[in-house]
Image: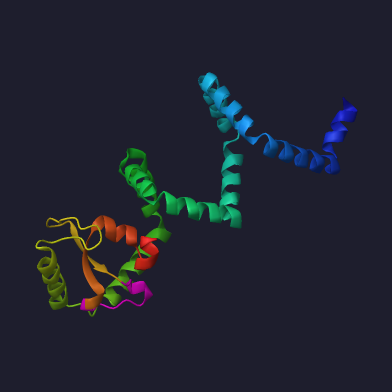
């Protein structure tokens, strides 16, 4: 038993075992996946309780591992791909969480922090400076042009017909990226499209 322990603990043998495991998995990939699925379906309740207990025991270690993985270049690649693929699903989940009791509690705590308050004030001040040259005449012209094209007030991106209070003024090229408060750069959009677009360019947002 001691000899066997020493064999597994040595670095050379560890590498050998890893390569053997990889080779075995690649050869028998389909059979192993099928077996795992079958086993999970037969022992569903048992597996769930086991993973719950395992997560409770290793909670902090798993969180730390996740954080390190997300910061790594391979983890960042995977996360960006996943976000692009499940963009709408993620936004819906975030909205649902923010509306829940726990989500409201967390966001309240977050905004009470001094740093966040200061950041929000700086953003508001910068936005006021950026919108200083925007006149009522330009805004009126944008809204009149929208009604002229669509018949009623409509979102330029999703073509949803908007009621009073559902509309927002949209910068096609964001002000943070050099977009100006001129008629050709302004449009009417719904809150959902305006929020999801953020400060992205149209090409990046549609992709």
- Tell me where residue 168 sits by quadrant: bottom left
At horizontal 55% and vertical 56% (from top left) the residue drawn is 77
Residue 200 in view, yes or no: no
Nearer the observer, 55 or 92: 92
- Name the main secondary structure of what is drawn in magenta: loop
In percent of width and height, residue 127 lies at: 30, 71
Bounds of the magenta segment: 173-183
In percent of width and height, residue 46 lies at: 55, 20
In percent of width and height, residue 203 lies at: 37, 67
Location of the N terminus by quadrant is: top right
Q: Is residue 119 left or right of residue 153?
A: right
Nearer the observer, 118 or 68: 68
Q: Residue furthest right?
A: 3
In percent of width and height, residue 78 lies at: 54, 52
Nearer the observer, 102 or 178: 178
Up/down of 107 relative to 29, above or below = below
């Amino acid at each position: 038993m001691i000899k066997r322990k020493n064999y597994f603990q040595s670095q050379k043998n560890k590498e050998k075992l890893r390569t053997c495991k990889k080779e075995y998995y690649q050869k028998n990939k389909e059979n192993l996946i099928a077996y795992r699925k079958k086993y999970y379906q037969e022992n569903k309740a048992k597996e769930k309780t086991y993973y719950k207990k395992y997560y409770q025991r290793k909670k902090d270690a798993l969180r730390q591992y996740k954080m390190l993985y997300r910061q790594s270049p391979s983890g960042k690649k995977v996360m960006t791909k996943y976000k692009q693929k499940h963009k709408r699903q993620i936004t819906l989940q975030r909205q649902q969480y923010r509306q829940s009791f726990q989500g409201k509690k967390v966001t309240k705590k977050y905004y009470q922090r001094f740093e966040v308050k200061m950041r929000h004030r700086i953003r508001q001040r910068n936005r006021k400076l950026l919108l200083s040259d925007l006149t009522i005449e330009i805004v009126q012209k944008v809204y009149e042009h929208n009604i002229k094209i669509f018949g009623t007030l409509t979102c330029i991106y999703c073509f949803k017909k908007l009621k009073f209070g559902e509309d927002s003024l949209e910068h096609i090229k964001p002000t943070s990226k050099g977009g100006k408060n001129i008629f050709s750069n302004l449009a009417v959009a719904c809150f959902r499209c305006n929020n999801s677009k953020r400060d992205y360019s149209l090409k990046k947002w549609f992709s």
